[in-house]
Image (cartoon, helix red, strand yellow):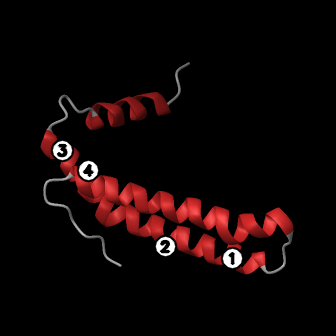
Amino acid sequence: MASKWVPVRDAILDTLKIDKVTEEMKEDVTRWILSEILPAGKKAADEFCAQTKEQAANESGWCKVRDMIVLPFLIQGGVWLIERTLEKTVTNAVTPQA
């Protein structure tokens, strides 16, 4: 007996099927990531880094270095690199809301 979910899943997949990815579609998705996804990611990264830096005060040795320097650098640097790279790939780059 087939699951009742299968026809629903197949209908969704058929609806979302994209026959051809165009340059315009790629730029639209990139702009959407820059304007909608990245600001939320930056906020989450900033909150995470702020908490790890606070917790570093109670750490010592390598854990203190990890929480104060390594994790914030990697996370915020990664977000910055993603943002700069995506901005360079769109024709008319959008500036995300702060």
Residue 43 is marked as 2
Q: Position of residue 45 (x, y in %)?
A: 54, 67
Q: Are marks 3 and 4 in contact (CB under 8 Å)?
A: yes
Q: SS at mark 4?
A: helix
Q: Residue at x 53, y 27 (%)?
A: 3
Where 65 falls versus 58 (above or below)? above
Precedes in sequence: disc 4 or disc 2: 4
Q: Residue at x 40, y 29 (%)?
A: 7
Q: Are marks 1 and 2 in contact (CB under 8 Å)?
A: no
Disc 1 target residue: 53
Where 77 falls versus 24 (above or below)? below
**Amino acid, disc 3:** Met
**Front: mark 3 or 2:** 2
Separation of marks 3 and 2 at Cα, in angstroms: 26 Å
Precedes in sequence: disc 1 or disc 2: 2
**Front: mark 1 or 3:** 1
Residue 29 is marked as 4
User: Residue 54, located in which quarter of the rendered image?
Assistant: bottom right
Q: Position of residue 97 (x, y in %)?
A: 31, 76
- Quarter occupied by the C terminus: bottom left
Disc 3 target residue: 25
**Front position in the image: 18 or 5:** 18
**Amino acid, disc 2:** Lys
* Disc 1 packing (10 Å; few <14; some 14–19; many ≥20): many
Q: Is 52 on the left or on the right of 12, as rendered?
A: right
* Disc 4 packing (10 Å; few <14; some 14–19; many ≥20): few
Q: Residue at x 74, y 67 (%)?
A: 65
* Disc 3 packing (10 Å; few <14; some 14–19; many ≥20): few
